[in-house]
Image (tube, coloured by chain):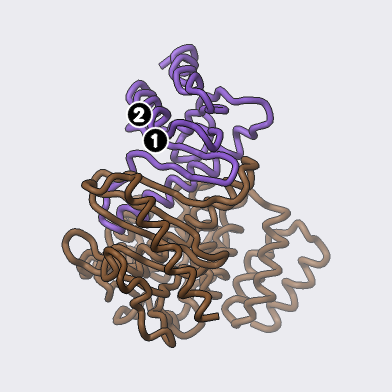
Chain colours: A brown, B purple
């Protein structure tokens, strides 16, 4: 492998526009040289921004670095460029599965199956994923060899679909996407507030849970899945506000078919989510959110 | 719907005082379908970000068990972005001043979403 890396590096140095960066980046990734792989992929993307395989490679590297949010964006981009891109479909399925969204994981694998109906590994992955209950916290990579982080990953040559059931098994030890707050063992940040036990969630910038909890109407714990999605929402909200010249965003209120949510930023690196059913008017929700944000802000300052 | 029909639909939204512009955006790819914006607003970029944000928010809301979003409102220091997803894979977007009547804009956006 080392020889091949040398050869490919030399070829890329000779012709920076060459597509060998795809192979080189993936070889470096497989060797765990993630920073080098990252540089190669980014340079390649600068030269080939509309190449789905380049986004796929970059997503794999990001996933190995556990930057799942950006990995999601890159696979999403690859899929927009090439809707039937196998690596992107498998990668998105992997991330959905990882956060326990089995329905989305299945949907993406089914799409992959339509693209490559004879691919046995997809059928195998589908069978495994379908074995998980919806929203199960166990719906991660554990217990499934094909989804194990340490399992061998497939090279991502542009014309060679990865043979693994789901792509980029990160080369590092498994860690939950939104782990419990660890040292902050008392997660009752909102003690004394209305809905302190459920329906309030405090996250850090990476989508890790700092306090609170969330259950859906069936009583299933959806805390980590929601936290993972919300990390991206915060970033996108910030970008959008900036682009529009509207200053910093101060809140995001959303009306759903079954309930309402309100997002606030109690601190520069924190996000607060409040969820209530539709009987709570949006205006009242905003007031509750303000109170909760003040409590969270105080609590965050105490932790600093 | 014709281009004139889209324009009429957006016109009803932008007539609300404090609304700086309105757009119809394809939620699948973030491309502008129709727009009626004040000068200085980068329509295509706003469309891409609004669609991306709408998709992320939808996923988070579905995961939280509150269902798909019917209306959402991004509040900022100097204005707001208000969005209603329509049934036809289109989102109706309004950019507004900070003191806009949110309830009124919401109603017009919902009407526009029904029309498209």
Q: Position of residue B11 (x, y in %)?
A: 49, 17
Whole-angstrom CA distance, mark 2 to mark 1, is 6 Å
Mark 1 closeness class: few <14, some 14–19, many ≥20 residues within 10 Å: many
Identity of the residue drawn at 23% across and 61% down: A216
Which quadrant of the rendered structure holds the N terminus of chain B?
Answer: top left
> Mark 1 highlights which residue?
B84
In the figure, A253 relative to A143: above or below?
above
Instruction: Verify CB contact (< 8 Å) between mark 2 and mark 1.
Output: yes
Q: Position of residue A2 (x, y in %)?
A: 68, 84
Q: Chain of mark 1?
A: B
> Mark 2 highlights which residue?
B110
Q: Helix, strand, or loop for circle 1?
A: strand
Q: Helix, strand, or loop for circle 2?
A: helix
Q: Earlier in the sequence, mark 2 or mark 1?
A: 1
In the figure, B58 relative to A75: above or below?
above
Q: Position of residue A217 (x, y in %)?
A: 19, 59
Looking at the image, which residue sits at the far top? B4
């Amino acid at each position: 492998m080392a020889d091949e890396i040398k050869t490919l590096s030399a070829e890329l140095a000779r012709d920076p526009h060459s597509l060998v960066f795809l192979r080189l980046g993936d070889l470096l990734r497989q060797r765990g040289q993630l920073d080098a792989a990252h540089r190669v992929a980014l340079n390649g993307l600068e030269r080939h921004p509309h190449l789905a395989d380049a986004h796929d490679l970059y997503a794999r590297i990001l996933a190995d670095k556990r930057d799942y949010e950006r990995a999601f964006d890159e696979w999403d981009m690859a899929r927009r460029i090439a809707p039937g891109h196998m690596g992107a479909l498998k990668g998105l399925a992997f991330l959905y599965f990882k956060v326990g969204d089995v329905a989305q994981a299945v949907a993406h694998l089914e799409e992959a199956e339509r693209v490559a109906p004879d691919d046995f590994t997809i059928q195998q992955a589908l069978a495994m994923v379908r074995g998980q209950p919806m929203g199960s916290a166990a719906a991660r990579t554990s217990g499934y060899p094909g989804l194990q982080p340490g399992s061998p990953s497939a090279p991502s040559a542009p014309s060679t679909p990865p043979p693994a059931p789901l792509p980029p098994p990160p080369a590092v030890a498994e860690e939950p996407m939104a782990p419990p707050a660890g040292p902050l063992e008392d997660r009752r940040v909102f003690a004394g507030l209305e809905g302190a036990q459920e329906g309030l969630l405090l996250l850090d910038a990476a989508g890790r849970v700092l306090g609170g909890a969330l259950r859906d109407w069936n009583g299933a714990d959806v805390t980590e899945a929601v936290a993972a999605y919300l990390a991206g929402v915060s970033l996108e909200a910030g970008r959008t506000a900036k682009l529009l010249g509207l200053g910093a965003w101060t809140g995001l209120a959303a009306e759903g078919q079954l309930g309402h949510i309100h997002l606030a930023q109690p601190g520069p690196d924190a996000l607060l989510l409040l969820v209530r059913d539709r009987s709570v008017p949006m205006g009242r929700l905003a007031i509750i959110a303000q109170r909760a944000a003040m409590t969270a802000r105080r609590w965050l300052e105490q932790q600093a | 719907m014709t281009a004139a029909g889209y324009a009429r639909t957006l016109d009803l939204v932008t007539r609300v005082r404090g609304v700086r512009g309105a757009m119809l955006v394809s939620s699948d790819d973030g491309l502008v379908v129709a727009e009626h914006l004040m000068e200085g607003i980068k329509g295509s970029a706003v469309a891409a970000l609004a669609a991306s944000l709408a998709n992320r928010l939808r996923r988070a809301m579905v995961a939280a068990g509150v269902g798909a979003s019917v209306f959402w409102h991004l509040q900022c220091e100097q204005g707001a972005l208000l969005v209603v997803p329509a049934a036809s894979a289109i989102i109706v977007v309004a950019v507004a001043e900070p003191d806009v009547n949110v309830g009124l804009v919401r109603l017009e956006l919902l009407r526009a979403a029904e029309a498209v």
